Image (spheres, grey):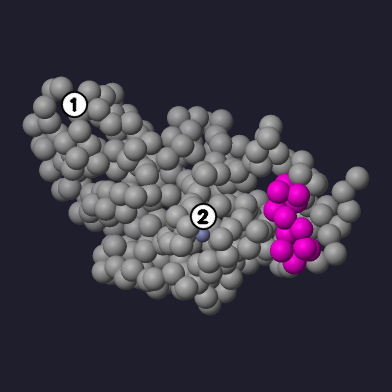
Amino acid sequence: MSEVLLRRPIPYPDESLRGYLIRLAQVNHTSPRKLYKLSSLFAGVDPKSLIMTTGKADLSKLCILTNLDEQRLLDLTFFNQLGKYAHEEVEVLRHISSFGTCSMAFCQVCPLCLLEQPYHRKLWEIRSVTTCPIHHCRLISQCPECQRFISPIRRFVTYCKCMFDYRKCKITKVPEFETKLAIILNEKLFNKKGLRTLLSDEIQGLSFRHFLYLHILFCYYFYQISTSKVKVHYSEVFKPIHLHETAIETFHMFTDWPNSFYNFVNRYRKVPKNFKGMGKWMNSVCYFIKLLSI
Ligand SMILES: [Zn+2]
Ligand SMILES: [Zn+2]
């Protein structure tokens, strides 16, 4: 039977659940893997992702260990914004799960945020967020010392397995425009108001999940056009190595809506017929836009 852990730090309101488990393990002198095991949060041999894009994991044991109620823990996941709608919008959520959120293989951090407060922000779990809206710099997903991807079940929030301190990473500053996508996703995620006025009413009114989904669909198109590749798999578009450029270019589409969309349709007409998969892709876009009546 599970018992309450001796030390139970209070989660930050904008912390991610898997990041919280790293902190929880650290203060209790154990490993995140052991905590996942104690909480029955394993799927086969691997820990569950806990992002909760397509459903809800059973957190009952973790509730006992932390003495926190389920809703408090769910707030650290994407259940309320995404997983809750999995039955009604299967395709939308499956797409976001595959390409919109970080996987068990990697996650990303802002070295300057970690320097201010060492905890893992929920916003960083969104794959197309490639910059920090506070520090105007790029997020990092790989250790500059050993090149390992940053693990969502690492032993310490701020250290790599090789003991490199992520807070000492070289900072890559970005122009203000490149932080706008992160700011808007942050506002939609935490129901804040601010920069949304940058967007037209139609886009402004989109929920977090619908905005994210539409952005993912267009990322595919812009990547395919920019690389002139006839056949592209979706997973290639969302590789951290070039996602930043694609995500930012795609974001332009939303700042001048609907003119940008009309321009896009005109350009799309000229796309060579041999661009395989584009027809199917266009159908998804049209279907979705009709669904939202924008
Ligand atoms: Zn930051
Ligand atoms: Zn390393």
Tell me what residue is drawn at x 91 percent, y 45 percent.
1
In the rendered view, would you say 289 is above or below 9?
above
Q: Which mark is residue 150?
A: 2
Type of the residue with mark 2: Ile
Find residue 44 and report its horizontal and vertical position in percent: 69, 32
Residue farthest left in this picture: 270
Which one is nearer the viewer's eye here, 249 or 71?
249
Q: Earlier in the sequence, mark 2 or mark 1?
A: 2
- Marks 2 and 1, Cα distance to the nearest angstrom? 35 Å
Where, by quadrant of the figure, is residue 24 drawn?
bottom right
Left or right, residue 237 beside residue 145? left
Left or right, residue 160 beside residue 177? right
In the rendered view, would you say 43 is above or below 39?
above
Question: How busy is the neighbourhood of tag 1: few (under 14 within 10 Å), some, or many (20 plus)?
Answer: some
* Disc 2 residue: CB within 8 Å of ligand 2: no
Q: Which residue is mark 1?
A: 275
